[in-house]
Amino acid sequence: MTQGSLKLGTLAGIDIRVHYTWFFAFILIAWSLALGYFLTANAGARGIRVDSITLFIFGGVSNITKEASTARDEFLIAVVGPVTSLVLAGLFWAIGQVLPAGTALSAVATYSQPTRHVGSA
């Protein structure tokens, strides 16, 4: 056991751990992106400022400064979350198709896909 690390789980009998310093790096990178790059790269998206986004296990909620001015903008804002989920699902499906079966990465990429047993239709 490595001191200062947190066990995330076990994969194929191997402990997967993350050192506490990783959290500091993640926070610093996310903070610098939020205060710098993202402010200029996404300025004025639909003309509505997003103050915060809270992620839950099955989705998220954004805190915006005002309501959308048109039904079209409201729809586009509402559909972003589900579309993002579909894009990620497609990406992981594609990765799972390319990786050789039986590898750890293939198992992670295809985790939610139904299991096919040999000899079943």
Image (tube, grey):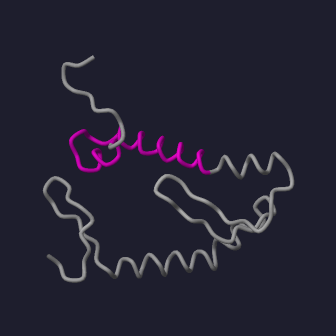
Q: Where is residue 8 in the image (x, y as percent from the top left)?
A: 27, 65
108 on left or right of 48: left
In this rendering, is residue 26 above or below 111?
below
Instruction: Write the residue at 65% across / 62% down.
Output: 62
Look at the magenta stretch and give its main secondary structure.
helix
Instruction: Write the residue at 18% across / 64% down.
Output: 15
Res. 112 image quadrant: top left
In this rendering, is residue 112 above or below 25?
above
Looking at the rendering, the stretch of residues picked out in magenta corresponds to 81-110
Residue 98 among those drawn in magenta: yes
Res. 107 image quadrant: top left
96 on left or right of 8: right
Count of numbered circles in the view:
0
81 on left or right of 20: right
Q: Which residue lies furthest to the right in this view?
A: 69
Query: Which quadrant of the rendered structure holds the N terminus?
Result: bottom left
Residue 18 among those drawn in magenta: no
Instruction: Write the residue at 31% across / 49% down.
Output: 108
Q: Residue furthest top?
A: 121
Instruction: Write the residue at 56% across / 65% down.
Output: 54
In this rendering, is residue 55 above or below 59?
below
Q: Where is residue 93 in the image (x, y as percent from the top left)?
A: 41, 40
Query: Which quadrant of the rendered structure holds the C terminus?
Result: top left
Q: Position of residue 72 (x, y in %)?
A: 81, 46
Name the residue nearer the viewer: 56 or 16. Answer: 56
Q: Position of residue 44 (x, y in %)?
A: 78, 65
Res. 14 image quadrant: bottom left
